[in-house]
Image (tube, grey):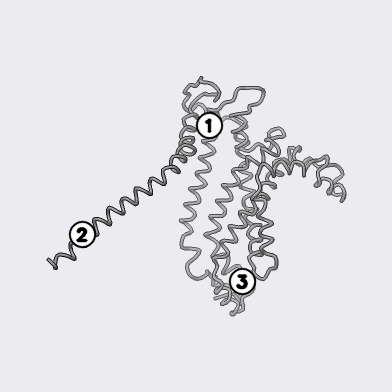
Amino acid sequence: MSATTPALQRRVQTRVGGWYERSTTRWCYLFLLPALVLTAMFSFYPMVMSWVYSTMDWSGFSDDMSFVGLANYAELVRDRFFWDSFGRSAVFVLVGTPVRVGLALLLAIVLNRQVLRLSVAFRTMFFLPVMASASIIGVVMTFVLSPSNGPVNAVLAGSGVVDAPVGFLSDPDLALWTALVVHGWKNFGTTMIYWLAALQTVPEEYYEAARLDGAGAWALMRHITLPILVPFAVIIIVLTAKENLHAFAIVQAMTQGGPYFRSEVIEIYIFRTAFAPDGGALPRLGYASAAGCFFGTATLLLALAQFWAVRRMGGRGRTGTPAVDAGAPAGAPR
């Protein structure tokens, strides 16, 4: 009997442990249920219904709904205003992303130095606009850039830079670029924080060993910092590009897509088509849903590009030692 007691105890413990584990798992699902229900209601359901509505001819304000298949998408392809707004969103990505990522990297390198006095205060100063509402910043900037009594025009006129007030938001050639600058300034702190977090992963021992070998600041940057930051750079660029696609709040608050649709990005186009059409026409929620699905697909492609790029760069950046060129200049770390 005594010989079988340990085996019996192990069987009892296994059964009790398995029952306890299953019971704990069931409780986990119970606690996750409210979040799953809310996610399904406010994320999954609208996502699915957007694709359904994109195949309908529907104003969104009546029960008159008819199935049109891919007709909305066919009309979308021929819509010049849609492609113009899509091109302006592309400007936000192709111009705003490299400028912001590059400037944020330079600033992060400066602020990451522990010997710099007030570095924490400067980090906070650059991050403060991120915490403010985009709509509030847009409204405030309309007053700041006003050609009649705005402080920017007052400074420009007072210093003799311009002879007449500049219509930053009323000039068709300047409105889009003004919105791009304000949007980049508002979200600059987020990109800077990404870079600061990435710089914290660079081991200080690498710098110390390189300095002992006589490496200068440029050699440290070229052969240690930049190679280690490459995988982070891929993620930061894609995240910044995705964020630049969503400039609705800033543009809507500052220009509403004007003047003459010259600052209308894709999100403003979708909003105008769905809720505020021109000339008193009926809203077209079905057609706007088709444009939204097209825009969502473009965002999804950016996310897939991020996944592919991260896997592509995997193992290249942090291989245990920084990459050093065979023809590195004298004094570079070896």
Vertical side of 261 occupied by 21: above or below? below
Query: Label 1: which residue?
Result: 289
Q: Which mark is residue 299?
A: none
Mark 2 or mark 1, earlier in chain: 2
Please tell me which residue lies in front, 125 or 8: 8
Q: Secondary structure at mark 1?
A: helix
Q: Is residue 245 visible?
A: yes
Q: Which mark is residue 11?
A: 2
For this orientation, the residue located farthest to the left is 1
For this orientation, the residue located farthest to the top is 64
User: For the residues marked 3 and 1, what is the alpha-carbon distance in whole angstroms?
Assistant: 52 Å
Residue type at numbered disc 3: Ala
Residue shown at 56% from the left, 72% from the top: 204
Vertical side of 78 occupied by 179: above or below? below
Mark 3 or mark 2, earlier in chain: 2
User: For the residues marked 2 and 1, what is the alpha-carbon distance in whole angstroms?
Assistant: 59 Å
Characterize the local packing of mark 2: few (<14), some (14-19) or many (20 or more) Cα atoms within 10 angstroms: few
Mark 3 or mark 1, earlier in chain: 3
Dividing the picture into quadrants, the one containing residue 225 is bottom right
Question: Residue 14: x and y, percent?
Answer: 24, 58
The C terminus lies in which quarter of the figure? Answer: bottom right
Question: Residue 80: x and y, percent?
Answer: 61, 31
Residue type at numbered disc 1: Ser
Please tell me which residue lies in front, 330 or 105: 105
Dividing the picture into quadrants, the one containing residue 249 is top right
Residue shown at 49% from the left, 25% from the top: 56
Query: Label 3: which residue?
Result: 219
Characterize the local packing of mark 3: few (<14), some (14-19) or many (20 or more) Cα atoms within 10 angstroms: many
Residue type at numbered disc 2: Arg
